Image (cartoon, rainbow, N blue to C red):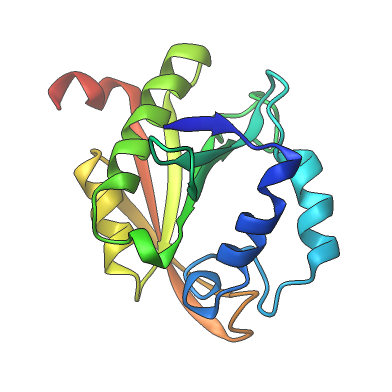
Amino acid sequence: LIYPVVSDDFDPLFDMLSRKDVAWQLGRWPHPLDPDLLRKRMNAMRWSGGWTATFALRTKSRDFIGMVGFHSPTNGEADDMSLGYALHPDHWGRGYMSDAVKAMITFLFDRFPISQILASAVIDNPASQKVLIKNGFTEYDRVPFIQRSRRYEVISLEYRLKRDHLSSL
């Protein structure tokens, strides 16, 4: 189940994002994680109907298990909508993220006049790559960057899903 992030999500978000095994798979979260950085970012994560939001993933009993979100740096002026996600390690390998990404894809293409969704996965994260490929994304580039959590250069696999590709899935 997908819900807007709320202030009560701070503790489970901090628990998940401060784990090295999670942080090392994400491009923009440092490790160790400063609680003040998460508090600041949580303000920007909240859904306000705009071009950026992060949603909490919850079990049927409403336990927090991860997050999925989107961001357009230009607020739709360019075709730059990107998708990001993270899942608590206790829930890896169960298909939750594949389902959440599928739901987010539908939401984004239904809500916004975009022709594509962008996403990325570090080269040593095959699980994230599988989530994207399972949902129709195709790799289009490989980009070296200094990852904030590792503090050294890694390769980011860049993916995209074109709106017109959906009809063939």
- Residue at the outermost left position: 168
Q: Is residue 159 above or below residue 142?
A: above
The percent coordinates of residue 53 (x first, y second) are 64, 34
Which residue is painted at 38% across and 58% down in the image?
141
Q: Is residue 139 above or below residue 161?
A: below
For this view, does 105 lie left or right of residue 138?
right
Q: Is residue 51 above or below residue 30?
A: above
The percent coordinates of residue 122 (x first, y second) are 42, 69
Most foreground residue, 31 or 12? 12
Residue 11 in view, yes or no:
yes
Report the number of discs: 0
Residue 27 in view, yes or no:
no
Which residue is painted at 42% across and 38% down in the image?
61
The percent coordinates of residue 97 (x first, y second) are 34, 47
For this view, does 30 lie left or right of residue 43?
left
- The quarter of the rendered structure image containing the N terminus is top left
- The quarter of the rendered structure image containing the C terminus is top left
Q: Is residue 97 above or below residue 88?
A: above
Most foreground residue, 37 or 154? 37
- Residue at the outermost front position: 61
Q: Quadrant of residue 142?
A: bottom left
Which residue is painted at 27% across and 67% down in the image?
126
The percent coordinates of residue 121 (x first, y second) are 41, 61
For this view, does 140 lie left or right of residue 81?
left
For this view, does 105 lie left or right of residue 111?
left
- Residue at the outermost bottom position: 152
